Image (cartoon, rainbow, N blue to C red):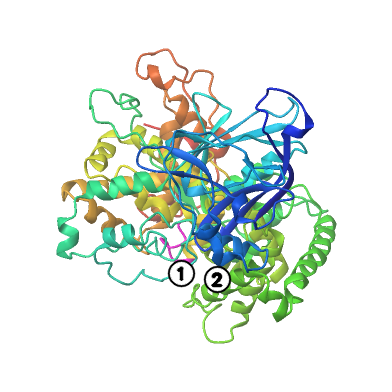
Amino acid sequence: VVYEQEGVFIHSSCGKNDDQDNLISGILRVIEKDNEVIVDWRPLDDTLDTSNILCAGKDSSSVVEWTQTPKDRCSRGADRPSSYEAEWDMVTTVSFKKKPHSNGDATTHANGESKWSFLFSLADLKSIKQNKEGMGWSYLVFCLKDDVKLPALHFHHGNSKLLIKCLEKHVVLTESPQDKRILLVNSQNKSLSQSFENLFDEPSYGLLQKLKKDPYTVTMGRFSKVTNYIFDSFRLSDHPSNQRRPPSEMADFLNDAIPGLKINQQEEPGFEVITRIDLGKQPEVTRREPVSAEEWAKNMDSEGRISNVDYIKQLIFKGGLCHTLRKEAWKFLLGYFPWNSTKEERANLQKRKTDEYFRMKLQWKSVSEEQEKRNSRLRDYRSLIEKDVNRTDRTNKFYEGEDNPGLILLHDILMTYCMYDFDLGYVQGMSDLLSPVLYVMENEVDAFWCFVSYMDQMHQNFEEQMQGMKTQLIQLSTLLRLLDSGFCSYLESQDSGYLYFCFRWLLIRFKREFSFQDILRLWEVMWTELPCQNFHLLLCCAILESEKQQIMDKHYGFNEILKHINELSMKIDVEYILCKAEAISMQMMNCKELPQAVSEILGIESSSVTPDSDIGEDESGAVLSCPTSLYQSVSTPVIAANGTRDSTQQMSETQSLTPA
């Protein structure tokens, strides 16, 4: 039982009168059993008398009956104890008869008492109608498929929203555009596999067949809970069965698999919303040397405060940090340390956070084996963590070998995070985010709180609703279409317009695409939140634009695109991609007619932003200026986009960072 609420009433009078006798108080439960989720309501004084059970059933004629369960059909449950196990045995024997539609009739028993009971599977739920809070008590009406409506459930004691939150863990609920009171249920099953099959180095024969048979196990690499709708390893083989498979089938499958993912797939080339924008030539961009310990110390006052936060962030964005600085600077970048804090304030904060961490760690450390046997969630979290830790960055010296202390810390921090956020717990892929942080911090407590801050940014990526991933894929499509509509059209022609091959990039912020040391550089640059918000989406654009020529010149199809993108892993030049992404950001910021949707994605404020529907029509828009403070002259060696180093070249706004 994952949800239980008393004081949930059925008004059997249906509004005819207000007599108390017509208010039937009951208990509402949501029950998980095997792979099914059941919503069950029954009167408070109901027992396991099977004749009380009223079930809604449908046939091919969409005719539904509220029917008593024949006692002779349920005799095998009569001698069982009054428990949900017995009730589940009984439920499987219920049969239904066809008769004219009856929207819930009360059943009268020998004692004259009127009783109503019903239960249904979430797989049969179509929509939920709810009234707004503040108008007396709230009520919910469940509508099953074929438009069968169950009796309204009135929450006299409130808390109907808790039920909705519970259901959202199992189904996707979206507000109806026609009626905001109605929540529509997406048909995609949200039962998620917890398997962790490492398929990165294995060929995947007949991928589509495997996906259709078991989409929850055949997923993208090692991340099953959130990525269960996306590809396994993307290593599609040249097996004949794959060559014969129409790519449109896979695109249709993905369209159904990610509810709410609406990416513009244009069929009429004459109507492309943002393709008429001329972004101009991409400016040349250079990078500087990493911030040194001396530069960091110069920007700290006598009490240990950072004196010029914006300037420090600019330096980090343009060059990253030398490794000796990361242990301290990352705490600021991730928000563990406030930028305006003194050295003494940070010491006090660390002391408080140390106490808090070990209190949470003690919670799971003190759970006995007997207790854990009765706590399936904690047991599952521990099992997943132990499995993941044993294969996270094992080639890195910090984690290699048996009984490595780094692995023990990785395990303990992830287990403690389950105590910090038990609702989310542990999801496969989170170990990839923690590993570099622990490597840099070399301290259990500091690594934990930095990881907590990082997870605050990444939380939506790992939620079952997948809202963060859906939003990012849609935003990436919008940016890429503005940047290169021709490339977008080509991808769409190959059923690749959903950009699902970028899923892994977004989920764990390129952790599997770059070398370990390059990821340290890439993450610290992104954490500056410069030069705009969602800079990581521009990094995706930069990588895709770099590969565009090969993909289009060689006429890559659906399978070849997946294979090519997957094989980029560990072959991407991080400095080149950072330069290119920054150049794209400048290109968009300097655009006179930037679409409103793009401005919102990048967080750009402008006095004149062209609405999406009028793109290319208004020539009077003001120039969207780049934040010039970011491009102040900094007299240091720089690295050009081609990777060459010039110790004499000075980075300045006029020399290297403005369009020709």
Residue 656 seen in the current view:
no
Residue 429 position, x and y percent, is 51, 63
Residue 622 position, x and y percent, is 47, 18
Q: Nearer the viewer, residue 263 or 517?
A: 263
Whether residue 514 appears in magenta in the rendering, the answer is: yes
Which quarter of the figure has residue 572?
A: bottom left
Q: Amino acid at mark 2?
A: Leu
The residue that disc 2 covers is: 384
Residue 88 shows which numbered tag? Answer: none
Q: Quadrant of the C terminus?
A: top left
- Element marked by disc 2: helix
| Contact (Cβ within 8 Å) of mark 1 with mark 2 | yes
How many discs appear?
A: 2
Is residue 215 positioned above or below 496 on the image? below
Stretch in magenta: 510-516
The residue that disc 1 covers is: 196
Q: Could you tell me which residue is drawn at 41 percent across and 22 percent down? A: 612
| C-alpha span from label 1 to label 2 | 8 Å
Q: Amino acid at mark 1?
A: Phe
Q: Nearer the viewer, residue 396 or 36?
A: 36
Q: Could you tell me which residue is drawn at 59 percent across and 70 percent down? A: 380
Q: Nearer the viewer, residue 132 or 524?
A: 132
Badge 2 density bin: few <14, some 14–19, many ≥20, Cα 10 Å: some
Residue 348 seen in the current view:
yes
